[in-house]
Each structure stands twice: as structure tokens, then as C-alpha cells.
Amino acid sequence: MNWNQRLAPDDISPWLGQALREGLLDDAKPSVLFHDLVGLRSRLKELHRVFPDGTLHAIAIKANPVVEVLRAVVEAGAGLEAASMEEVELALAAGCLPERLVFDSPAKSRSDIRRSLELGIYLNADNLEELERIGESSPELLAGAKVGIRINPAVGEGRIAATSTGGLRSRFGLAMPQDPEGIEAFAKRLASFEWLHGLHVHVGSQGCDLTTLVPAGERALTLARAIDAAAGERRIDTIDIGGGLPTRYRNEDVGIAPAEYVAAIRDAAPALLDYQLITEFGRSVQAPCGFAATRVEYVKELAGEPMAVGHLGADFALRVAYRGQDWWLDISVYSPNGEPKDLVDLRPMHVAGPLCFSGDFLARDRMLPAIEPGDILVFHDTGAYTMGMWSRHCSRGMPAVVGIEGDGTFRTLRERESARDMVRFWS
Ligand code: LLP
């Protein structure tokens, strides 16, 4: 499957049939989350193909923290990016070698810093105080430290201002001055940390395109050169360009293939490709591999308009429920045996989740075929930032996560959470 292609309702139908036959989806197990492991491996292969040899593709764990998914990522030759010490442990549990692991939390404690230096993982500091803390480590630890500093390149917010990391007032990293004198002074300050060898930028997540992604890399390159000049020697050898490639959630969304991204870097800032590069893609790798199926429990009228109630809602797709102006999931309707319903006689339907608050909708006035109780709804492109942002509101257990293998077999990647698991969780 090429990079910008999406799983279509007809691609999914045989898998739904199989899940029904294998008893993975029934009255007692009304939802299942699928992850296409073949698609995942082919996306990782494409990253390795188009970026320079030796690039470390540290896939963002937060996008999909299921250990078996992380293990598939590691086995395909990629590394991992952790945003917390817990994610560092998830990476190690998935078999990631410390030297393939990048740690980016904006709130690292002294013990987090010590543990990561002892482990020998790559550390991106968020601010000057953190660099100073790292500098207080023992000379032996500092000698082997692999440290970068995150810069806010301030190249623009992209389409989704609320969660963008590319605006002037974005909260992550050091704001980089824009004028030559400011850059020189800034570089001089950073050059005083003699063990600092890396720069990190990340603009995203979603809503950005090459007009923000490429300038972010260019600004890192400018700063790398200024730091080397201030130090009077080659200091910066690693540039981490972060993630942020967009995903196509609708057919009208424009996708950016990694090959286009690399070509645009080669045009605008070819010298960037001579550094040890790190990338931190999350959404663009994982989202298209996932889809979620849920049984419709009831269909009722809401002021004369039909509303289907399923078993996945704001617990699963937090941003879609709370910020529907920015986020969208395509929905397909299947009959109880897994056959796609014909796209005729479409009507506006509301699609509601199971939670006890009135905003729990994943779609309003969506043009869909008539939905009946027992039908199956599929939410598309849910492989990133869904179960990873799972909400415990109403204490509903997370459905099983099922991996689809190349020979068409299913493998349980994470067991369904039972009511007993919830009792344990809150005890
Ligand atoms: N690197 C860093 C430092 C990040 O903060 C992120 C995502 C990534 C890499 C991966 O970015 P990606 O390639 O996935 O765009 N729906 C969520 C998204 C939060 C993602 C934050 N950071 C939300 O709205 O909160």
C-alpha cells in the first residue's frame, strides 16, 4: 500500500467477518481495536528507504503505547521516542536498545535525568535550567552523555492552533531568536555546554505541512552552524527533526509522503541531510494502521433526528469529542455480519458514545446509511492518539487490541480490560 493510501471499507470487511467468526466481537465484547502490522512494517520500511542511511527513526510511543506494537516497531529496525520515564520503561519492555531510545519529557526530574544518563539513552533537554541540571552530573556520566536541546523554531502554528508546537507562544523548547545578533548570542550560550551535541525541533502534531516542517529543520541547521562557530569547533553532530507529518483522516486531506519531505529538505537545506538525523514520527506512521469496530446498541430519536449509540466515545477519541472543530474520524457502517452497508439513501445521523455526559458524540449530522441496532460501526485511521489517550471517565475497560498479520491471522496485542481490571485499577 502506498504511503497516502487509506484502508477502505471493503478492505476492512473480511477482517470484520473473521473477527465475528472468531468471537472477538459480540454482545459481551462490543468493541475491538485493530492494528495492521503489515501496514506498519511497510511504513517503517519506507522511512528507512527515503531518509539517509543511519537515520534513527524514533517512533513516538505516545501515539500508540501498546508494547506489542512497539515491539513490531523495534523489530522493523526503528527506535522509539519516550515522553515520560514510564514510556522509557515501555520501550525497554518492547526490546528497544537504550542507544535507539530518545527521551523528550518537558518535565524531567533530577532522578529522570540520572536514570537516562545511566541507561545511555539520548536526552533532549527542554530548557536552559535542564541543561544546567544535566551539567551537574558526574564527569563520567557527562562524558558518555548524548544530549540535545529542543528549540522552538516559531515557524507558524499550522491549522490546529490549540495543540500546535510551532507558534511563537508554543510551550516547548527554547524560543529561538530570529535576528542574526540574537542567534549569535543564543549560540554562544548553548556552546558553553561543551557536552551538548544535538538540536531538536518538533512542529505538529497534525495541521502542519512542508511550509512549517522544512523551515523548522532549516532553523535548526542555522543554529547548529552558529553553535559550531561560537565553539570554534564542530560541536553539533545530531539534528532531531521531530515528527509532525500529517495524516489523511478524510479523502480530501492532503498527505505528505516521507519521500516528498526528504526531497523538500534536499532542495531547501541539503546540508541537514549530512548530520546524524533523528525523526520522531508518530501519527503518520501509526494512525492509518488502526481501525476500531463497535456494535451499535441502540438507535433513538433526538428531537426527531436519529442517533446511534455505540460502545466507543470520548474515552477512545478524546479530541474528536471535545474539539470536533479540529478533529474528524471517518465512519463506515456494516450490517451485523460484517458486510458494508450500501451507500444509498444516506441521511444525517448522530453517532454517540457510551459515556454519561451529553457531549459524548463522535459525529453529528453525518451522512450515513440507515443504522440499526446490532450494526457495526468502524472508525477509520485510529492507530494513533486514541487508546494512547484513553480516558477513564465512567470506568469503561479498553477493548482488546488485535494485530493483523501478513497471512491474515489475528494476534492479540493487548487483552480486553475486564470489569475486574477496573476494580483493580481504582483500588
Ligand atoms: N516528538 C515530540 C516531542 C512530540 O511531542 C510529538 C507529539 C511527536 C514527536 C510525534 O508527533 P506526530 O508525528 O505524531 O505528529 N492528538 C494528540 C496529539 C499530541 C501529540 C503531541 N506530540 C493531542 O491532541 O493531544
Image: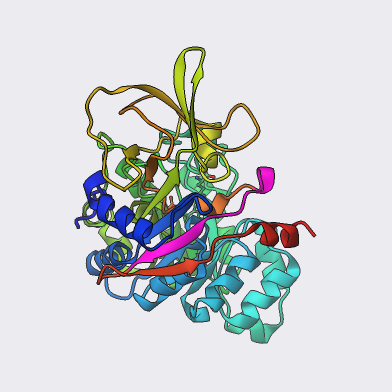
Please count the marks in the image.
Answer: 0
Would residue 133 be seen by someone viewing this image from the given angle? yes
Residue in view at x 53 percent, y 65 percent: 415
Relative depth, front residue between 118 and 187: 118
Left or right: 293 in relation to 270:
right
Left or right: 386 in relation to 51:
right
Q: Which residues are magenta?
A: 392-404
Quadrant into which the N terminus falls: bottom left
Q: Position of residue 369 (x, y in %)?
A: 30, 28
Residue in view at x 55 percent, y 61 percent: 416
Residue in view at x 33 percent, y 53 percent: 16
Residue 71 falls within the magenta-colored stretch: no
Q: Position of residue 96 (x, y in %)?
A: 48, 78
Quadrant into which the C terminus falls: bottom right
Give above or below for 407 relative to 167: below
Quadrant of the rendered image containing residue 240: bottom left
Quadrant of the rendered image containing residue 143: bottom right
Residue 396 falls within the magenta-colored stretch: yes
Give above or below for 132 relative to 333: below
Q: Residue lying at the far right in this picture: please name it.
A: 427
Q: Position of residue 38 (x, y in %)?
A: 28, 66
Would residue 229 be seen by someone viewing this image from the given angle? no
